[in-house]
Image (cartoon, rainbow, N blue to C red):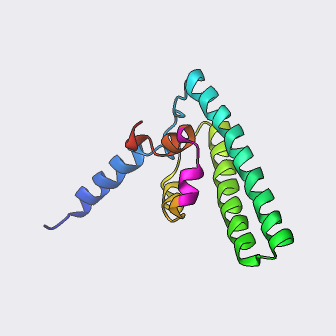
Amino acid sequence: MKVTERRLKKIIKEVLEGSPIYSSDPPVVNNTKLAAIENAMLDLDKTISDLKKDADYAANTNGDLKAADMYDMDMIQLQDVRDHVQYLIDNGQSAPQGLKNRIGRFDTIVREMIPHDIYYWIFPELGQ
């Protein structure tokens, strides 16, 4: 199928108008959902703290540097998600595709450490 220049411009315009990045109205996050996300952020903070303790324990007590590195990498990935989600919520934005792609490349174990309220806020298309 041949796509004309006119059709291509129309497709691009439709995509840009439907994109939250180019939308003039920030996505609505109701107070109940926002409170659930804030509570989930506290849970995520605890998980990150626990991973830090596990990394320190593995490195100092067991001398298992490979395990310590694994815990550190998991902690860094979760902290990155936490910081990114906090930034998006503070600025009234929804999760961009880049964040979704990055999370998709995480180990399954790390993805499962993301609290459900945050995960489904990032991936609303998956439903709850």
Q: Which of 65 and 39 is in front in this view?
A: 65
Residue closest to the eye, 80 or 23: 80
Instruction: Name the residue rendered at 51%, 47% in the picture.
Output: 21
The residue depicted at 68 percent of the width and 40 percent of the height is: 43
- Residue 10: x and y in percent read 29, 52
User: 45 above or below 57?
Assistant: above
* Residue ID at (83%, 64%): 56
> Can you say which quadrant of the picture contains the C terminus?
top left
- Can you say which quadrant of the picture contains the N terminus? bottom left
Taking the image as shown, residue 38 lies to the left or right of residue 15, namely right
Classified by dominant secondary structure, the portion drawn in magenta counts as: helix
Q: Which residue lies furthest to the top in this view?
A: 31
Q: Does the magenta stretch include residue 31?
A: no
**Left of 124 or right of it: where is 55?**
right
Q: Which span of residues is magenta-colored?
A: 109-116
Does residue 98 lie above or below 34 as drawn?
below
In the rendered image, the residue lying farthest to the left is 1
Residue nearer the viewer, 15 or 37: 37
Q: Where is residue 84 in the image (x, y as percent from the top left)?
A: 65, 50
List x then y, in percent, for residue 103. 53, 58
Please tell me whether residue 94 is drawn above or below residue 106 in the rendered image. above
